[in-house]
Image (spheres, grey):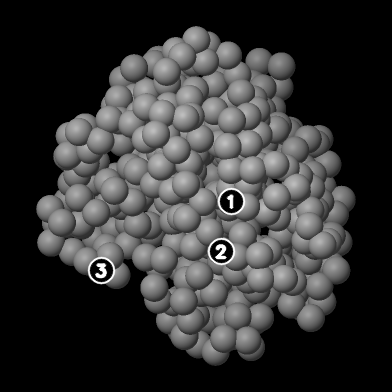
């Protein structure tokens, strides 16, 4: 793998390339305008949400695990109870099997889908989390019906399996069902093709790979690199260079022609979300993961929606708010880029007000405590269905 490709598969590249589009926006060359004078006001709103959600400031990383706890149900403890007889690393493997499959099923659900659990209804990310948790607990990802995921079963998951587990019907439609099924099939193929990394065909064996290659102490970005390299084949092949599927990486014409590597803007949203979600189970197995502050914010519609809904960024042409945009459109790439950059700026103000440094209060805590939920809160206030301010034409594999 050449150095330019390695660079694109890094958090550093996400920060640097998104900053280029931020700078071009300030020069008036993109679809957006930035109103940095609103930063203190938006940071104050995020701080208010943080204090509402976590008054003691004991904030976990922004990860899938929080979604398993919605509705006042401690599903994580239910899982722990079933795993208590296992050794710490095997417990971690099982939790990683769960969270990897769940994250891959997490792209936007649409405004009308919901999941019913004992009379309680959950929608969007939380509903997807609860539905995927039940799917895993029912043994749907394992060839023998046990609490694990394996390549053989994953490769045979189809749309009907997703529709049944997620209670999909004509009156309860879920966006991107076939895309979600395809991602799980791709996960199975990817894991089966790398027995040196995923022994026994289990996604959760990523912990064994990390310990074998990095020992019991490493950076969060080491884990991200392992995710990008070893799970990279999962994603639909958009840009493939020298046999490497770059995943959530997009060409923006302001940065160069399509065949120019300098024109590419990486986000790695689901890969970073997955990495944040892997940290807790791996640490529970006695491994230290540090320097999480090097990771970036997640370029998705809750964080991005916060920027538009608060007026921190505005579209020059408001007619663009009325139509749906594909992930490769210039306006979506610019929106996502500005999201990454502005999240860093919001986080700096929040940390300063709370008296923490970036290692004590990494971006993952700012996302979990505040920006994601602030985006959700203001969307609900402005739009009855809590939809994002910019409409997305998504296939279930990006957001």
Q: Position of residue 87 (x, y in %)?
A: 56, 83
Comparing labels 1 and 3, the label whose residue is closer to the camera: 1
Q: Kindly state the secondary structure of the residue where label 1 is placed.
A: strand
Q: In the rendered structure, which disc, 2 or 3, sits on the residue that comes first in sequence?
A: 2
Separation (CA) of disc 2 from disc 3: 22 Å
Q: Kindly state the secondary structure of the residue where label 2 is placed.
A: loop
Residue 360: which numbered mark, if any? 3
Q: Position of residue 361 (x, y in %)?
A: 27, 63
Mark 1 nearby-residue class (10 Å; few <14, some 14–19, many ≥20): many
The one of 326 and 127 positioned closer to us in this rendering? 326
Q: In the rendered structure, which disc, 1 or 3, sits on the residue that comes first in sequence?
A: 1
Q: Is residue 116 visible?
A: no
State the residue at coordinates (71%, 16%): 170
Q: Position of residue 166 (x, y in %)?
A: 66, 35
Q: Position of residue 364 (x, y in %)?
A: 38, 57
- Left or right: 8, with 296 as reference point: right
Are the two marked residues, 1 and 2, in contact with CB atoms closer than 8 angstroms? yes
- Numbered-mark total: 3
State the residue at coordinates (42%, 21%): 315
Which residue is under mark 2?
10
The one of 68 and 229 positioned closer to us in this rendering? 229
Which residue is under mark 1?
266
Picture quadrant of residue 338: top left
State the residue at coordinates (59%, 56%): 271
State the residue at coordinates (60%, 80%): 210
- Left or right: 379, with 95 as reference point: left
- Left or right: 82, with 302 as reference point: right
Mark 2 nearby-residue class (10 Å; few <14, some 14–19, many ≥20): many
């Amino acid at each position: 793998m050449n150095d330019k490709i390695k660079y694109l598969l890094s958090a550093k590249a996400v920060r640097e390339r998104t900053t280029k589009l931020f700078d071009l926006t300030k020069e008036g060359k993109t679809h957006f305008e930035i109103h940095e004078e609103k930063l203190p006001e938006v940071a104050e709103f995020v701080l208010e949400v943080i204090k509402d959600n976590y008054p003691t400031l004991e904030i976990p990383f922004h990860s899938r695990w929080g979604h398993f706890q919605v509705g006042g149900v401690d599903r994580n403890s239910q899982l722990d109870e079933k795993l208590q007889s296992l050794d710490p690393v095997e417990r971690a493997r099982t939790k990683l099997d769960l969270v990897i499959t769940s994250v891959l099923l997490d792209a936007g659900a649409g405004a009308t889908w919901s999941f019913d659990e004992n009379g309680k209804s959950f929608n969007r990310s939380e509903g997807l989390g609860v539905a995927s948790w039940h799917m895993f607990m029912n043994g749907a990802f394992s060839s023998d019906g046990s609490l694990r995921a394996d390549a053989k079963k994953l490769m045979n998951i189809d749309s009907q399996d997703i529709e049944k587990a997620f209670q999909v019907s004509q009156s309860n439609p879920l966006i991107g069902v076939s895309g979600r099924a395809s991602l799980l099939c791709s996960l199975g193929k990817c894991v089966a093709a790398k027995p040196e990394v995923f022994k026994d065909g289990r996604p959760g064996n990523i912990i064994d790979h990390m310990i074998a290659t990095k020992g019991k102490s490493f950076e969060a970005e080491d884990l991200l690199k392992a995710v990008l390299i070893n799970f990279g084949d999962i994603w639909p092949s958009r840009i493939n260079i020298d046999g490497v599927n770059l995943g959530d990486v997009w060409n923006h014409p302001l940065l160069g022609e399509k065949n120019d590597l300098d024109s590419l803007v990486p986000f790695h949203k689901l890969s970073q979300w997955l990495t944040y979600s892997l940290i807790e189970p791996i640490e529970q197995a006695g491994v230290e993961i540090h320097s999480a502050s090097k990771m970036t914010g997640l370029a998705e519609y809750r964080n991005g929606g916060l920027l538009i809904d608060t007026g921190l960024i505005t579209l020059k042409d408001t007619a663009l708010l009325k139509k749906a945009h594909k992930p490769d459109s210039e306006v979506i790439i610019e929106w996502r880029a500005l999201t990454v950059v502005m999240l860093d700026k919001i986080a700096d103000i929040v940390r300063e007000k709370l008296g923490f440094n970036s290692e004590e209060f990494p971006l993952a805590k700012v996302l979990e405590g505040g920006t994601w939920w602030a985006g959700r809160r203001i969307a609900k206030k402005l739009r009855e269905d809590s939809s994002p301010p910019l409409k997305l034409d998504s296939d279930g594999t990006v957001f």
